[in-house]
Amino acid sequence: MAPFPDEPISPTEKLSPDAAAAASPEEMLACFESAEHHTSAALSGAGDAIIALSSLMATALGGRGRVITLGAGTSGRIGALDLAEWGPTFGVESPRRVPLIAGGGAAFFEAVEGAEDDGDQASVDLEAIAFSGDDLLIAISASGAAAYVAAGIDHAAAIAAPRALVTSHPRALENRQGLLRVVVETGAEVVQGSTRLKAASAAHRVLQRASTLCALELGWIYRGRMVAMRATNDKLRRRATVIVSDLGEVDSAGAQRLLADAGADIRSAIVSAWFGDSHQAAQQRLAAVGGRLDLLEGQRR
């Protein structure tokens, strides 16, 4: 008997005629180039949903919640990859950004076959991290067919937690009430069904965009600079110096002194440069406006 006879095939599982006809590296590379244009157009069409996702992120991280990504295989790894950057880039503590992947930690490095079909494990994994209604669940699934992903979304729904799905299937889980669906219709892959290609790239770009918009809303980005960044190595310390020098309108030596006085807190150093404040006074100013430099900018002398 043919498996899953009543399920419509996901667009990500279809065959690309151009790719099927590619017989040389040059022709296959041309297929990738064509696919890039299609993916970019699809991402542009998902703009409103990406903004909505960034707002959910900002609500969770601006309050008491966490952002949890959940997926199987490449989708789970994409979630982990983006969350890993939130610490150094935006200063988000690791307990507030938690990636979950079907098959557990080992699946980040090696495929755990069949793990995506274990829906029950999604609830086990979410309960293990004490997932709550304050948290945001971002499920990632190219086709929306992974039982692990669907069950995770249903677990979030049962406790009325905010939830989103990043997918390349326009009909994936469309019957789930209250689910924000971020659909990037990437279509057939260059290699049939290999969603580590277009679909995964699109999902990563969705998360990049949404997390960056969230950071802008929360004041972690100001005038194109990562002002909540943790300067944890020489490269980042040099970057922090440049940021404080540029925004604080001081020379490099002055920026380094301000950063030293501020305990490497970039925003505090900038406020001290603007107002001549001590670190403590700068912190008080920042606390009064939720850390938003844009809300202090107009008060400058």
Image: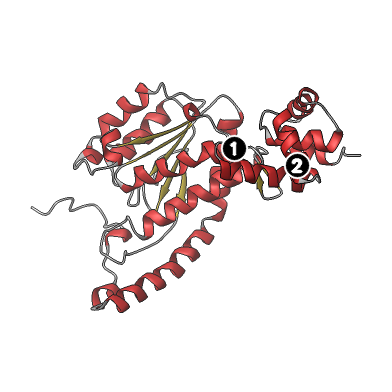
Question: Would residue 98 appear left or right of 14 to someone viewing this image?
Answer: right
Q: Is residue 41 above or below residue 250?
A: below
Instruction: Name the mark nearer the viewer: 1 or 2.
Output: 2
- Residue 76 position, x and y percent, is 35, 42
Going 81% across and 37% down the picture, which residue do you hit? 273
**Res 253 label:** 2
Name the secondary structure under disc 2: helix
Q: Callout 2 environment at 10 Å: few (<14), some (14 to 19), or many (20+)?
A: few
Tell me how the rendering is colored: secondary structure
Residue 44: percent from left, percent from top: 53, 61
Q: Earlier in the sequence, mark 1 or mark 2?
A: 1
**Closer-to-camera residue (182/283):** 283
Q: Residue furthest right?
A: 301
* Residue 139 picture quarter: top left
Q: Which residue is the extreme one toward the left?
A: 1
Residue 231's tag is: 1
Residue drawn at 28 percent across, 43 percent down: 146
Kind of element beneath mark 1: loop
